Amino acid sequence: MAKIYSENSIREIDDLSPKEETVKFLLNYSKALSVISSNKLKFEALLN
């Protein structure tokens, strides 16, 4: 496990920017998600 989390392997990953497709998917999903509260319960509805 120590080799996986070494400093050398962390330095190799510089570009962690998401793809444009991923951002659009997450934004569209969040727009379609509706949370309904009733008493102490919460219901999630996906409006697609």
Image (cartoon, grey):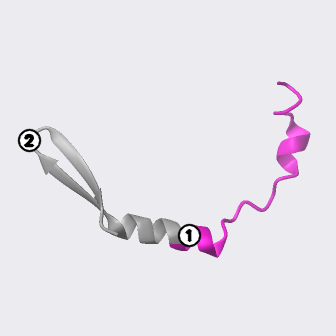
Q: In which quarter of the image is residue 35?
A: bottom left
Asked if the magenta segment contains residue 17, the reply would be: yes
Q: Quadrant of the N terminus?
A: top right
Locate the C terminus by quadrant. bottom left
Identified at 46% across, 70% down, the residue is 27
Q: Give the range drawn in magenta.
A: 1-24
Callout 2, which amino acid? Asn
- Percent coordinates x, y for residue 19 in the rendering: 67, 70
The residue at which mark 2 appears reads as 39
**What type is the residue that disc 1 sits on?**
Val
Q: Residues within 10 Å of mark 1 (few under 14, many from 20)?
A: few
Horizontal and vertical percent position of residue 33: 33, 62
Q: Mark 1 points at which residue?
A: 23
Q: In this view, does 40 lie to the left or right of 10?
A: left
Q: Seen in the image, is 43 located left or right of residue 4? A: left
Please tell me which residue is depicted at 86% across the width and 38% down the height of the picture. 7
